[in-house]
Image: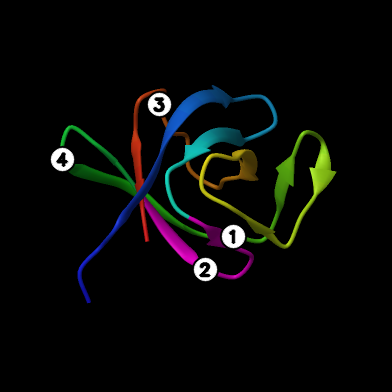
Amino acid sequence: MAEKKIGRVTHYYDKIGVAIVDLSAPLKMGEKITFKKGGEDVGEQVIESMQVEKEVVEKAKKGDVVGVHVDVPVKEGAEVYK
């Protein structure tokens, strides 16, 4: 299955391991995403924790800015695929 770009990392909080992602497509809990920077995979992540404006959500829609807990450090500007 071809990967689909669903957003971009706008900020990363390294102390708490949270990436802020500006979504260009919907995202749901349990989905697997891949972070890429410069065309190279940075890491994969299954969404286990997601918030919109400090509220825990099960799904987010296109245009939402979400915070997701990540296990690997990601840089601002990294693209997000699922």
Looking at the rendering, the stretch of residues picked out in magenta corresponds to: 26-34
Q: Residue at x 35, y 25 (%)?
A: 77
What distance separates the C-alpha of mark 2 from that of mark 4?
Answer: 21 Å
Q: Which residue is mark 4?
A: 39
Secondary structure beneath label 1 = loop
Q: Amino acid at mark 3?
A: Lys
Q: Is residue 35 magenta?
A: no
Work out whether mark 1 precedes mark 3 in sequence or the reverse, and give the earlier one.
1
Classify 53 as above or below 30: above
What distance separates the C-alpha of mark 4 from that of mark 3?
Answer: 13 Å
Work out whether mark 2 precedes mark 1 in sequence or the reverse, and give the earlier one.
2
Percent coordinates x, y for residue 68 in the rendering: 62, 44
Quadrant where the N terminus is found in the figure? bottom left
Q: Which residue is mark 1?
A: 47
Classify 3 as above or below 63: below
Q: Amino acid at mark 4?
A: Gly
| Horizontal side, residue 10 vs residue 13: left or right | left
Percent coordinates x, y for residue 35 in the rendering: 36, 45
- Please name which of the two marks, 2 or 3, marks the residue nearer to the observer: 2
Q: How dense is the environment of label 1, judged by Cα within 10 Å: few (below 14), some, or many (20 and up)?
A: some
Contact flag, marks 2 and 1 (Cβ < 8 Å)? yes
Contact flag, marks 1 and 4 (Cβ < 8 Å)? no
What distance separates the C-alpha of mark 2 from that of mark 1?
Answer: 6 Å
Q: Which residue is mark 3?
A: 75
Image quadrant where residue 67 sits: top right
Q: How dense is the environment of label 2, judged by Cα within 10 Å: few (below 14), some, or many (20 and up)?
A: few
| Horizontal side, residue 51 vs residue 68: left or right | right
Work out whether mark 2 precedes mark 4 in sequence or the reverse, and give the earlier one.
2
Work out whether mark 1 precedes mark 4 in sequence or the reverse, and give the earlier one.
4
